[in-house]
Amino acid sequence: MTVKNGASMFRACVRVVTEKLSGQHLGMLLPSIPWTLKQQQQIEIVLVEGSRVFESWKNPPPPVYMEYFFFNITNVDEVLLGAKPKVQQVGPYTYREYRYKDNVSMVENGTMVSAYNTKSFVFLREKSVGDPAVDIITTVNIPGWAVMNKVKGNFFKSLMVNAMGVEVFTNRTVQGLLWGYEDALLTKVSASQPDVETTFGLMYKKNGSNDGEFVYHTGVNDYMDYGRVETWKGESQLTFWKSDHSNSINGSDGSAFHPLLDKKERIYIFTPDLCRTIYMDFEKDVKVKGIPAYRFTPPRSVLASKVENPDNAGFCVTPQECLGTGLLKVSPCRKGAPVVASFPHFYLGEDKFAEAIDGMSPQREHHQTFLDLNPTTGIIVRANKRAQINILLQRITGFPKTKNLKETIFPVMFLNESVEIDDNSAARVQKLLLISNLVSNFPLFIVGLGVIMLLILIVLLVKARRQKNEVKTKPRTAQTSAEDDTSYSPVSNKDKDDPQNGAYIGLTSKSEQQA
């Protein structure tokens, strides 16, 4: 092969590689694999039988823990005379929360699925500060406040309730406050009003129960709809509040989120506990057991006053329901009870609420609600849902025991519902992400390999041209003339037929051929 032929071959190779790496071919190659991955994720992450996520959606494997913290008031007599309440935080009382989807059935030709979110709780002594059946908490008498608020303004009913001996504060066990106790006042009221429950508890009837039927989008038609709530208790809108915006049911129930999350998007979660939809925004990148995640948290605007956030005006059923930033009066969905929701220690609320109670110390680390979601799969790798239950204390006409009370948002209890991905699930997610990264980076690998090949061919081409130039400029000698006279030619027929030589091509000089 001559140098000229070799250079031609090199140029041909360069041309082929260049064409393969040109905009036309490269443009077709780069999107193909990521798009295939995206399509595969959209197929696998759907709420239908046989998908990778369906069973874990019905029966989540990571353990969920529910911690309850109570505020024990230490100066009852002084508060009744108008003093600032002093409280001590007591807790946690920790329960293992078991949750699963019950009565699951496909509807709307498999585009939606209906289910009931059933929860049960088992006490964990080793993760708790004491025995809930023994420990006593002094707190607001919530049933008494509910009855007083219901009959206020009615002279005769107020007189009857006073005669029953209603108290502002009460002493109860943690277990009673959580899971229910027989209340003397409610028992007397129920004699004339049979629909009134005689038992009260913050978690009464919630152990082994559900919040009603949910209908979810499966994500078959659009992966962005994966896990989105369509209806709750057969309704697509709430009726508790004054505006369509406030009554809207948006987003998921907090147990599932669509894949391929974006930092710029806002996540919506419908929560029956608050009787409303809340939202979360991206805060920062985090890692949980080696899994990358986006942290989403509720901003201050979620519970902001209507002055700070006009969208929240609909949550003010009456002017008295507008209590300020950081609070949500949930009386409309709690049978009129003066219950107020907030974040623990009035985190993200106006300073005046925490300052009105001696013992409040809002801290982001301990009181923030957040979700850590893997952006590729939408899987929850860690979460802390934190909320506080408060009672609006104020003077109530017709009840002398309240005449000296200062209007105060009194904290009763806050909860921390937490979950972190277990090791087995984390290993599966890491494996999935590894495959995803390899596939996603494959086009870059191809491009890199092509660039390396191109550089090698260019180097060889330059070297070949340099050698050609050296040949052209090199002076001719007797030796080079003899070398130039050498060519390939068959040997004589006699030698070729010699069985000892076999079949080969011999080298002879032109002078020998001419002789």
Image: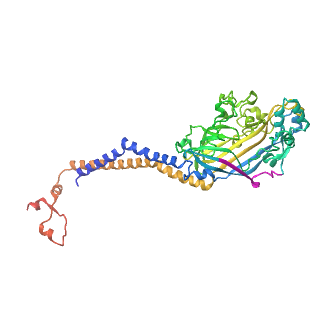
Residue 117 among magenta residues: yes
Dividing the image into 4 quarters, which one contains the N terminus? Answer: bottom left
What's drawn in magenta, residue-wise? 116-133
Please give the name of the residue rendered at 70% of the width and 35% of the height, measured from the top-left corner: 348
Q: How many marks?
A: 0
Percent position of residue 303, x then y: 69, 34
Q: Judge from the rendering whether residue 32 lies leftward or rightward of residue 163; answer left or right.
A: left
Identify the residue at the far right of this view.
163
**Colour scheme in use:** rainbow
Percent position of residue 135, x then y: 83, 49
Dividing the image into 4 quarters, which one contains the C terminus? Answer: bottom left
Identify the residue at the far bottom of this view.
500
488 or 281: which is nearer to us? Answer: 281
Percent position of residue 483, x then y: 18, 57
Residue 509 among magenta residues: no
Q: Judge from the rendering whether residue 237 lies leftward or rightward of residue 185; answer left or right.
A: left
296 or 60: which is nearer to us? Answer: 60
9 or 245: which is nearer to us? Answer: 245
Please give the name of the residue rendered at 71% of the width and 45% of the height, measured from the top-left corner: 416
Identify the residue at the far left of this view.
515
Percent position of residue 399, x then y: 88, 32
